[in-house]
Amino acid sequence: MELAAQRRFGLSAAVLKWIAVVTMVIDHFAVAVYAQMAGYDYEVYRMFRKVGRLAFPIYCFLLVEGFCHTRNVVKYLRNCFLFAVISEIPFNLAIFGKLVYPKGQNVYFTLCIGLCALILLDQLKLRYQTKAVLLKLSIIIAAAILGEWLDVDYHWKGILFIIMFYYVRDMQEWIRNVVGICAFAYEVTAPLAFIPIHFYNGARGRQMKYLFYAIYPIHLLVFGLIRFYLAGTL
């Protein structure tokens, strides 16, 4: 993202992360807490969910940026997988109201599969340049199938969104935005995520890496406990 990196003003990666965090928390609050309240307003619930649709495109974008800038991609993948495991029970509690729920896995698993696909695709890009098209397609299809088979958050679409951001990263900005908006158009408010993404300036900003990792399982655990309390099972 050479143009973004040259901008003096705009939003840093840290600011984008906070936007993603806030919208994600609002979304999960709607599902785990608000929808469990007696007499909740469905229109308010829908509004919360629509706000939450902004989070995932930003997380996909930041994952690709992190992949392209990290000095240690193995450590990056390790951290994602570690927090995927840590977050699974809190995710089950908050979203499904159960301690164990095999039919849905948290978004960190989505990010892990996407990151693995990026690592393999990047290696092919370095070794074969424009060749090995069929092999690249095989990796993309296999990653999407794995995401669907494991029932990760956003399923196969989530994996393809991550890969999409990887392939449009070096295109002209207006093309990246149009492709992204079209890809997420199935969710009414998700394309709005490309407003803050558009203003990304390429700077890292003040990073609180492990705080950003930990917010996900912590807020899910809190919401999960509140959900159980509202249900009278805590």
Image (cartoon, helix red, strand yellow):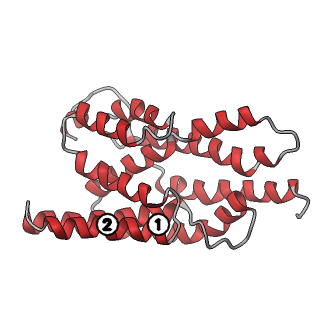
Cα separation, mark 2 vs mark 1, equals: 11 Å
Query: Tag 1, which secondary structure?
Result: helix
Relative height, residue 198 to residue 161 (above, below): above
Query: Tag 2, which secondary structure?
Result: helix
220 sits left or right of 153 in the view: right
131 sits left or right of 226 in the view: left
Q: Is residue 72 visible?
A: no
Mark 2, other Cα within 10 Å: few <14 / some 14–19 / many ≥20: some
Query: What's the residue type where badge 1 is placed?
Result: Glu
Quarter of the image with the N terminus is top left
Query: What's the residue type where badge 2 is placed?
Result: Ile
Name the residue located 21 percent from the left edge and 32 percent from the top edge: 6
Q: Which residue ends up furthest to the right in the rendered image? A: 232
Where's residue 75, x and y in %? 37, 69
Between residue 212 and residue 199, name the one nearer to us: 199
Where's residue 98, x and y in %? 74, 68
Between residue 185 and residue 105, name the one nearer to us: 185
| Upstream in sequence: badge 2 or badge 1 | 2
Q: Which label sits on residue 67?
A: none
Which residue is labeled 1 in the image?
148
155 sits left or right of 92 in the view: left
Name the residue located 33 percent from the left edge and 71 percent from the top edge: 142
Quarter of the image with the C terminus is bottom right
Which residue is labeled 2 in the image?
141
